[in-house]
Image: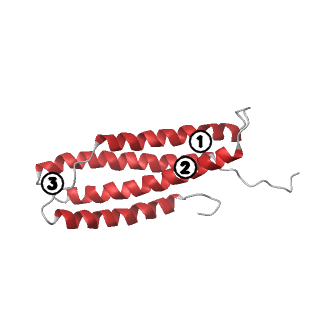
Amino acid sequence: MTGRGVRAGTALLVALAVGGASWLLWELTTGEGTLVPRPSWLAATLLVAMAAFVLGFAWPVRAYLGGRSTRRLDPLRAARIVVLAQAATLTGAAAVGWYAGQLAVVAGDLSLVANQDRLWRLGVLVGAAVVLALAGLIAQHWCRVDPRDDDED
């Protein structure tokens, strides 16, 4: 994570690592006869709301950098938004892994009626987490300042 922010490859690695750990944890837990907990719709709503907030906070930076805003932009605020975008990317990636691991365990035993309901809910949660990770990546892109070419001046 140099000056380029959190990259998509890093987010993918986080999702895979957390997904593997989640799968292992839930595989061991459900092996004892326990079900994966029923996922909440509220969690999906919160993930999508966080994505909207991240993009909403990054929009003024995008407008300023694109020359479409005459309002002054506080550099500290812009830096904080970049950090928020990076955190959203990593949080979304970790949530993708967490819920995808549960989804894999549930999909492995659809003979249980309870798992059929959990399958759809977990699929929605994985999608909502992807939305958060993508929002973070987009917000980082919006806040990117390309290096100036000093030879032109």
Q: Residue at x 45, y 61 (%)?
A: 12
Amino acid type assigned to the residue bearing label 3 in the image: Leu
Amino acid type assigned to the residue bearing label 2 in the image: Ala
- In screen coordinates, is 62 left or right of 84? right
Q: Residue at x 41, y 57 (%)?
A: 94
* Marks 2/3: CA–CA distance: 37 Å
Q: Which residue is mark 3?
A: 110
Q: Which residue is mark 1?
A: 58
Labelled pair 2, 1 in contact (Cβ < 8 Å): yes
The kind of secondary structure element at disc 3 is loop
- Is any part of residue 141 visible from this angle? no
Q: Quadrant of residue 72?
A: top right
Q: Quadrant of residue 43?
A: top left
Label located before the other in sequence (3 or 1):
1
Label located before the other in sequence (2 or 3):
2
Residue 88, percent from left and from top: 49, 50
Q: Which residue is mark 2?
A: 85
Label located before the other in sequence (2 or 1):
1
Residue 37, percent from left and from top: 22, 52
Please give the label number shown on residue 109: none
* Marks 2/1: CA–CA distance: 8 Å
